[in-house]
Image (cartoon, grey):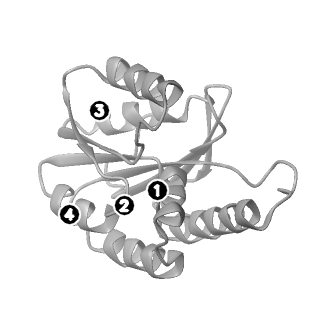
Amino acid sequence: MPPEMTVQLSLVLGGARSGKSAYAESLVEAYGANAVYVATAAAGDSEMAGRIRDHQSRRGSGWRTVEEPLELAATLIREAVPGNAVLVDCLTLWLANLMEAGHHLDNETADLLDTLVGLQAPVVLVSNQVGEGIVPDNELARRFRDHAGLLHQKIAGEAGQVILVTAGLPQVLKRPS
């Protein structure tokens, strides 16, 4: 499914290795603008470093990468300007980074939501759908799951389109009105 070219904000959800990032990249490339990849991941171990390399090689050289694990709202203000199309991958890693750094999640997510409303370029947000499994056995994991679910609901309310990717197959949950 090609993106609706008038959509300024898209949310792409899916599980681990569902194909959500590759699908989101195709949405950004379809805009025909300068493709900007905002990476929230940090290579904390060799396994994550390998995942980052896989994503980079799949995207190729036509993308400019901005690594930003924490200051997402400020990065979007700077990067989501006319002539660009921006992909943020991913919101759940951003939330985990904020939690690890001791940031106030409600304030950070409110700042992000306020920022998303006024951007001047298409933005595609990628996030892991984490709330469909078992209930986590500890308070920190439950708090993470709850914040991710609430953030997804709020962004889905603002987004022009929402897509769930399962087994590489995009399912449109919300179409532009």
Query: Do tag 1 and tag 4 residues touch (Cβ < 8 Å)?
Result: no
Left or right of 7? Residue 74 is left
Q: Nearer the viewer, residue 168 or 93?
A: 93
Label 3 sits on a secondary structure element that is helix
- Circle 3: residue type: Glu
The residue beneath circle 4 is: 120
Picture residue at 63% right of the left edge, 30% below the top: 18
Q: Quadrant of residue 111?
A: bottom left
The earlier-in-sequence mark between 1 and 2 is 2
Q: Nearer the viewer, mark 2 or mark 4?
A: 2
The residue beneath circle 1 is: 94
Give x and y (percent) for residue 129: 66, 49
The earlier-in-sequence mark between 1 and 4 is 1
Picture residue at 55% right of the left edge, 70% below the top: 157
Could you give the CA–CA distance between mark 1 and mark 2, rounded to whole angstroms?
Answer: 6 Å
Relative vertical location of residue 87 with respect to residue 161 in this rendering, above or below: above
Label 4 sits on a secondary structure element that is loop
Numbered badge on residue 70? 2
The earlier-in-sequence mark between 4 and 3 is 3
Q: Nearer the viewer, residue 146 or 161?
A: 146
Label 4 environment density (alpha carbons within 10 Å; few <14, some 14–19, many ≥20) = some
Could you give the CA–CA distance between mark 2 and mark 3, rounded to whole angstroms?
Answer: 25 Å
